Image: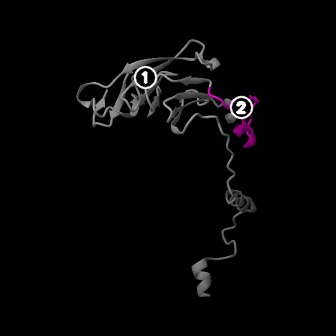
Amino acid sequence: ELEDDVLGDEINKDGDSDEEEEEDEIEDLDPVIEHYSLKHNGGVNRVRAMPQRPEVVATWSDKGKVNMYNVRGILDSFERSSGGDSISSRKIARDPFFVYQGHSTEGYAMDWSRVNEGHLVTGDCDGNIHLWTPSEGYTNYSNSSFKVSSAYGPSGDNIDNPSVEDLQWSPTEGTVFAAAECGGDIKI
């Protein structure tokens, strides 16, 4: 009798339906992990998806390159395998559609603007920050989809340790972002 008090009743006294028991059984199933690999030159330092178009994914490589991928085909495949209503069946593109080699070294800092679609900022370990703006018709996703310009370089008291470790766009201003540097500086 004592054992039953500790473990609880085995009889369904609450009158729960068989339907609820079936839901519990479904929740107890082991998860299935589905994945796809993309070609990437070097190690991945950072990965970020564009908030307005989650099929556009940017990565920072330890080789100093920023890569852009169109993962729409992968997202469609996940949707179909989960029983969703994905109507398209796009080819899965495993190569980046855009590779930027204009940074002087590798980096970790990267952020997409939530205010201006397609605007990205990247920062490297030499203290350089580059601003990405979408080209007209950038939704075709090609090597001319973005215009990248140097927005900032190391200066002032932080010349010895200028590495940009984090970047964050303002949640309300489309032209404002903050940069955190290794030397202890935060610049707006």
Q: Quadrant of residue 12?
A: bottom right
Q: What predominant SS class does the magenta segment belong to? A: loop
Q: Residue 131: give x, y in percent of width and height.
A: 44, 21
Q: Residue 144: give x, y in percent of width and height.
A: 58, 15
Q: Quadrant of residue 78?
A: top right
Judging from the image, what secondary structure is the residue with disc 1 in?
strand
Please provide the residue range marked out in magenta. Answer: 77-96
Q: Name which of mark 2 and mark 1 comes first in the sequence.
A: 2
Q: Nearer the viewer, residue 57 or 22?
A: 57
Q: Residue 171: give x, y in percent of width and height.
A: 41, 29
Residue reaching furthest to the bottom:
1
Residue position for label 1: 130
Q: Nearer the viewer, residue 66 or 180?
A: 66
Judging from the image, what secondary structure is the residue with disc 2 in?
loop
Classify residue 34 as left or right of residue 42.
Answer: right
Classify residue 74 as left or right of residue 68.
Answer: right
Q: Residue at x 51, y 24 (%)?
A: 101
Image quadrant holding the N terminus, namely: bottom right
